[in-house]
Image (cartoon, rainbow, N blue to C red):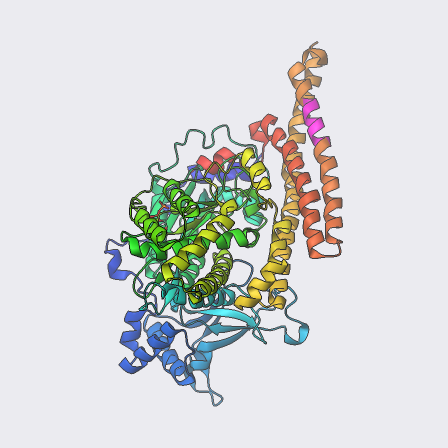
Amino acid sequence: MSHSRFNAIDTILNRTELDIDFQDQPIEKISSFFGCNVFNEQAMREYLSEDAYLGVKAAIQAGTKLSRETAEVVAKAMKKWAMDKGASHYAHWFQPLTGKTAEKHDSFFSLTPDGKIIDEFNGDNLTQQEPDGSSFPGGGLRSTFEARGYTAWDPSSPAFILEVGEGKTLCIPTIFVTYSGLALGYKLPLLKSQSYLEKAAIPVCQYFDKKVKRVSVTLGWEQEYFLVDEALYNARPDLVMTGRTILGKHASKGQQLDDHYFGSIPERVYAYMRDMETECHKLGIPVRTRHNEVGPGQYELAPMFEELNVAVDHNQLLMDVMDRVARRHRLRVLLHEKPFAGVNGSGKHNNWSMSTNTGKNLLSPGKTPGKNLQFLTFFVNTIKAVHEHSGLLRASVASASNDHRLGANEAPPAIVSVFIGEELTKVLNEIEKGKTTKEDVKKTLDLLSKVPNLELDNTDRNRTSPFAFTGNKFEIRMVGSTMNCASPMTVLNAMMGAQLMKFKTEVDKLKGKGKDTDTAILTVLKKYIKESKAIRFEGDNYTDEWAKEAAKRGLGNFPNTPEALDAYVSKESKKLFKDSGVFSDTELNAHHEVMLENYILKLDIESKALEELCLNYVLPSAIDYQTALAENVANLKTVGVTAKDCTYQMDMIKRIAANIKGLHAAGKSMTKERHKAHSAKTSRASAIHFCKKVKPLMEKIREFADDLELIVDDKDWSLVKYREMMFMR
Ligand code: ADP
Ligand code: MG
């Protein structure tokens, strides 16, 4: 019998190096080609006049709108640059709420009404496009009369050339909105949250340094992923359709031995990484770190941190590049949060901080004591903000696929808490205990100066924490590997902005009553330290004791997406988003709706894919083997061995029968529940039904199927096995 599984294994075993595109790996220095496909400073200087260049730069830096004339000049320069590099098309590149990126290509080539051939790309083409995109999720924002979506240029993120094979396309980062300007994608709310946070942070910085005129948010993401051979991938319909294995017996060897983690990188994977990194570097994505992760076949890469908006774009672009390059190497990259049960899933840690135009990282404790009050201000306000809006932060990383990580005892739990380490805990405790007379403030500041250099002390880490201070930034570990970082970043910026505004008001009030600035600041911080104490947790986040303790402290625990998402539309969140201008109520409701729809669609697809796998693979394999066993027993009877003596065969026949029966019953129930889920009155009710009724049945079906996989003759099993996907390269 020829199974796709064995064909796939044969393909791998017979593969020669020549089958894999090892691309000419450049021996050039990275610095010699870094950003060569980006319309960056260097390109702008070369293609724009001095005046135009300075004008564009100033507008981008100040975040002001570019005039029509400037847009015209930039478009001309961009077209020349792109065509000099061989680009034939341009595209507005945007980020709809699918989590992926989208692009619609138009050629520069055009015909005038009188039939002349021209290369066209003007200011209008640059600044706005109408890709329609009415099939992207909109959460009801677009009624039929304004169904179209519009994209608008985001000059703060540089345009780039995407090379796919021989094709080269000029890509322009854009926001995606409705006709009336409501957000349909991730970028617009992100940009709004960023400028809101900046507006709130500048006056606070000015308590310490009047020279601070700009504050930008910084993000350094870390991307985890799995690699699987293309042949095996294609022989697993669930991977192809859902990005994860929805059934499959765990291999006897998984990650127990920890022999993969930071191990030597396999040669084939290494070739892939180098190739992919080269593509990234050409696109100006400053990737720097690579290593094996815990799961077999799991890896990680991280760049140097960048300004938030650009960092988010770069991560979105990276996920696209990773996939494209993997195909050249006959590999498939799995970005799903939980491709394999029983081994670690993948996350995308978001390292977040803020920095000033004076070059100061606002979350860096630094060495000079006086300045530490500034650090403390931003540090404590972050903790306070997370305490106030922990539910919303949880909601911002909620998705069907991330539910497999959060709360599953391997990644941070669904309970949001903040880890700050022993030294800083001591500092906060001192402040909390201390008085806030002028004398005491001085003492506290002296004490801060004695805190060892935290930036150098990387030993003090808690890998189980969802939100951890790591020396000079906060690391949000709840983010899922497939996610657009914009989602948690938008929420974090908004809540931090609102928090800093409150802080400023309170400090100014005390100052108005005659307190000096330092004392006023420390007084308010002291209050915040007390008020937000419940969110701080230094212990093991994976334990049951913590779940109990957290409940006592009144912290939220929402292990599933439909319920976690409620926090988006709570009264507090609505107020936060309205005050910050990040989402109007209408936009927020639509966003919530889309997130629920995404959840429903994912589970619907998974449940149907599971049904197919059972019907087309699992059950036929099991029945074949059962038939063979029954024939064997019947044959033995002809030579005088009775069924009573065929204990193994009979046990297996019965075990297979029991599993088939169980699977059949659970399958029927699952289909019924799925239909019920679809007829629920609201999206939320439908999502909850999927979560509470359909999902448990999927898990039950998997148990039957996995037991069948364990006992059925290997040669009869038609689905690629875990050990093959994780260890065969
Ligand atoms: P690890 O956490 O793996 O030990 P690091 O702490 O050195 O490694 O850095 C992890 C990530 O944090 C990197 O992507 C890095 O760019 C990012 N990072 C470092 N400093 C900042 C900062 N000030 N703002 C945002 N991200 C930062
Ligand atoms: Mg890290």
> Residue 246's image quarter?
top right
Q: Quadrant of the N terminus?
A: top right
Q: Quadrant of the C terminus?
A: top left
Asked if residue 11 shows in the view, the reply is yes
Looking at the image, residue 194 sits to the left or right of residue 56; the answer is right
The secondary structure that most of the magenta stretch takes on is helix
User: Residue 210: percent from the left, percent from the top?
Assistant: 32, 68
Looking at the image, residue 113 sits to the left or right of residue 687; the answer is left
The extreme bottom residue here reads 114
Which residue is pictured at 64% across the width and 57% down the height? 597
Which residue is pictured at 69% across the width and 54% down the height? 684
Asked if residue 632 shows in the view, the reply is no
In the rendered image, the vertical position of residue 548 relative to residue 521, given as above or below: above
User: Residue 28: percent from the left, percent from the top?
Assistant: 23, 56
User: Residue 605: percent from the left, percent from the top?
Assistant: 63, 50
* Highlighted magenta segment, given as a residue range: 653-661
Which residue is pictured at 33% across the width and 54% down the height? 372
Observer-nearest of 725 and 457: 457
Observer-nearest of 232 and 204: 204
Which residue is pictured at 63% across the width and 75% down the height? 146
Residue 197 within the segment the image draws in magenta: no
User: Residue 496: percent from the left, percent from the top?
Assistant: 47, 59
In the rendered image, the vertical position of residue 543 relative to residue 681, given as above or below: above
